[in-house]
Amino acid sequence: MDIPAEFQIIVTNLYYLWLVHAALLLANMIVGILFLLGGGDSGETFGKALVYFALLIPLSYICWFRPAYKAFRNDSSMNFMIFFFVFFCQLEVLVIHAMGIGNTGSCGFILGISTVNKGGVFMTLVGIVMILDGLGFAMCGFANFYLLVTIYKLYRGTGASTEKAQTEFSTGVMSNEHVQAAAVGREIVTNKQTNNRTNERV
């Protein structure tokens, strides 16, 4: 209810995209375990997939979903800028996961095809699941790109700009109590130093 009615669908879609991203990272980790059990490697894929699962899910929520939520709620250019930067980085991560390059912890197309070619029933099934996981990352990447372009068009349509984001940032920083206290303290120190120099000259 915090979001204006015309933007609620977009924010809802962003939330669903975040859920899908979390589910794909979980699937990536599970496939990494299966790859390890099948003797595909000595645990590098699973270890890195576990790190991605533990880090990327909370970071994606904090670094791009929350800024997008705040941007639509408060019409905040600064939060839009944060969202655009991090969401674009998210798109690159999704492309890497979809590709599935070996020893990156991503169970995508390349690793899936090479696993299928190794032969054996179990590893063939693991390879097929890897390819499906890569397909999921690719579809998530397309959805990411679509929402990025759609939100950017909305943002530009409102007349928002980088200058507005810079103004919001500087206003927000200067209204912070800690920053104000530091500025007052610095001014006091500067005044004392100036007075001391004046007294020395006299």
Image: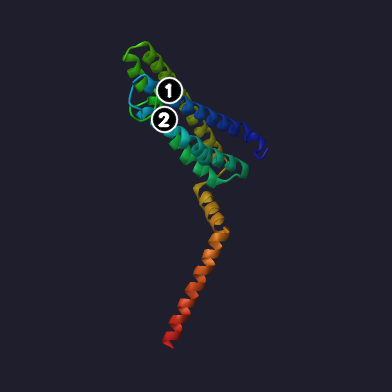
Q: How is the image coloured?
A: rainbow
Where disc 2 sits, the SS reads: helix
Quarter of the N terminus within the rendering: top right
Q: Residues within 10 Å of mark 1 (few under 14, many from 20)?
A: many
Q: Residue at x 53, y 60 (%)?
A: 179
Q: Give the left or right position of residue 96, taking residue 142 as reference.
A: left
Residue 96 seen in render: no
Q: Residue at x 46, y 78 (%)?
A: 194
Q: Is residue 113 above or below residue 168?
A: above
Q: Residue 61 placed where, x, y %?
A: 53, 37
As rendered, which of 182 and 91 lies closer to the eye?
182
As rendered, which of 7 and 98 lies closer to the eye?
98
Q: Residue 123 placed where, x, y %?
A: 37, 15
Label at residue 31: 1
Q: Residue 146 placed where, x, y %?
A: 50, 29
Type of amino acid under label 1: Val
Q: Is residue 151 above or below residue 184?
A: above
Point out the tag, 1 or 2, that comes first from the N-terminus: 1
Q: Residue at x 49, y 75 (%)?
A: 191
Type of amino acid under label 2: Ala
The image quarter in which residue 43 lies: top left
| Dot 1 and dot 2 residues touching (CB under 8 Å) | yes
Residue 15 seen in render: yes
Where disc 1 sits, the SS reads: helix
Instruction: Give how far apart the Cα atoms at labels 1 and 2 are.
Output: 9 Å
What residue is shown with label 2? 49
